[in-house]
Amino acid sequence: MPLGPWSYRLHGWLLHFLGRDGAAYAAYQEAFRHTPGAATAACLGYLAARLERLEEAETWYASAASLAPERGEHHFNLGYVRDRLGRPRQAIAAFDAALHLNLQLDRAWYGKGLAHAALGEHEAAATALEIAVELQPMNGIAYYHLGMAYHHAGRHQESERIARRLAAFEPRLARQLMLDGEHPQLLPLVAHLEA
């Protein structure tokens, strides 16, 4: 007895739940073949990314974004995969599409900041990362990257301010920023890490 389109998705979900991502991917492909949909394409993009098949993940996330252009998370995921593929300019375009739909999507601001940094556009990186840390004030890694964007943009006082702020809640990242951002005078703030 042939399976209906919904049962291929259920089968894919069950296989993924059991840790059989390759088989789950095949089941979701069959589901998409029967009934193309954004949710199924997004599942395929996720599984392809987990399996390190990034070109396929990009194709599936682009399909999801095309089938449901109103869903910001599909555009964000497309940007994430493009960034991992080393395509920062295309990643920025996808992050911008996500942000056009939801300005509160902190992950898209963060991804956009990292993509700008990869292009050497440190002022643009700082602008995006400022919003990311405003939306997620306890995101230590975003603060670290903001401090480094300031450092590379020649805004050393701002970088130092971020290192001090980071020392209050993420001392290990603060120490790394102090070293990478050339703020050795601040190392006493995290001296307890060396003990």
Image (cartoon, helix red, strand yellow):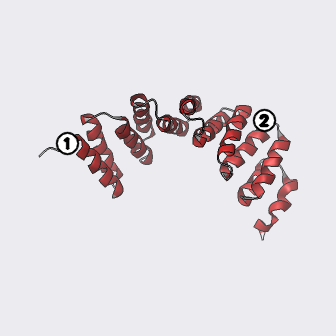
In the rendered image, the residue lying farthest to the left is 1
Please give the name of the residue rendered at 82% of the width and 37% of the height, measured from the top-left corner.
154
Asked which quadrant contains residue 103, the reply is top right
Q: Residue 63, image x and y in percent?
A: 40, 31
Asked which quadrant contains residue 53, the reply is top left
Position of 13 with respect to 159 (left or right) is: left
Residue 179 in view in this figure: no
Residue 44 in view in this figure: yes
Label annotation for residue 153: 2
Give the Cα separation between the discs numbered 1 and 2: 56 Å
Q: Which of pointers 1 and 2 indicates the residue nearer the eye?
A: 1
Number of numbered discs overlaid on the protein picture = 2
Please give the name of the residue rendered at 79% of the width and 41% of the height, measured from the top-left corner.
151
Q: Residue 145, image x and y in percent?
A: 70, 45
Q: Rate crowding at label 1 as few (under 14), some (14 to 19) or many (20 or more) other CA atoms within 10 Å.
A: few
Q: Rate crowding at label 2 as few (under 14), some (14 to 19) or many (20 or more) other CA atoms within 10 Å.
A: some
Please give the name of the residue rendered at 34% of the width and 40% of the height, measured from the top-left corner.
40
Position of 133 with respect to 27 (left or right) is: right
Position of 103 with respect to 140 (left or right) is: left
Which SS class for mark 1?
loop
Residue type for callout 2: Ala
The residue that label 1 is drawn on is: 4
Please give the name of the residue rendered at 84% of the width and 50% of the height, measured from the top-left corner.
183
Residue type for callout 1: Gly
Label annotation for residue 157: none
Q: Residue 176, image x and y in percent?
A: 74, 54
Position of 12 with respect to 123 (left or right) is: left
Q: Residue 9, image x and y in percent?
A: 29, 45
In the rendered image, the residue lying farthest to the right is 185
Which SS class for mark 2?
loop
